[in-house]
Image (cartoon, rainbow, N blue to C red):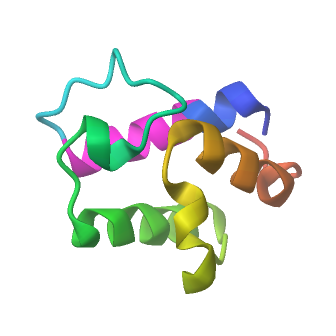
Amino acid sequence: MTNAEIKKEILDILQAIAPDEDLTNLKDEVSFRDQIELDSMDFLDIVMELRKRHRIQIPEDDYIQLDSMQSTVAYLEPLMKDVVA
């Protein structure tokens, strides 16, 4: 997957988890939690959805890497390089 495809996938997951949130002005470099209402369970849902959709295992120690869109895409890029969108 390309960076743009990974970003779209994350936006799709966020929209499913927080359907009432407006994601159109989401800033890539700002923490998700600073921009939208996400609690720790919502964050776990993101991790679980990535596992379900793409069989990606994210160790708990790496969760901090999924703080913003920019850091999430950078973290997932090598893991998803062979995934077909």
Q: Quadrant of residue 65?
A: bottom right
* Residue located at (78% from left, 44% from top): 84
Q: In the rendered view, does 78 fall on the left or right side of 17?
A: right
| Residue that protrudes farthest toward the bottom in the picture | 60
Quadrant for the C terminus, please. top right
- Viewer-proximal residue, 83 or 45? 45
Q: Quadrant of residue 20?
A: top left
Indicate whether 78 appears above or below 22.
Answer: below
Quadrant for the N terminus, please. top right
* Residue located at (65% from left, 71% from top): 55
Q: In the rendered view, does 17 fall on the left or right side of 32?
A: left
Spot occupied by residue 7 in the image (x, y as percentages of width and height): 59, 33
Asked whether residue 40 is drawn in magenta, I would say no
| Residue that protrudes farthest toward the left in the picture | 20
Label count reads 0
- Viewer-proximal residue, 75 or 79? 75
| Residue that protrudes farthest toward the top in the picture | 25
In this picture, which residue range is highlighted in magenta?
8-18
Q: In the rendered view, does 37 fall on the left or right side of 82?
A: left
* Residue located at (54% from left, 32% from top): 29
Spot occupied by residue 78 in the image (x, y as percentages of width and height): 86, 54
- Viewer-proximal residue, 31 or 78? 31
Q: Magenta: predominant secondary structure element?
A: helix
Q: In the rendered view, does 59 fall on the left or right side of 78?
A: left
Spot occupied by residue 77 in the image (x, y as percentages of width and height): 79, 48
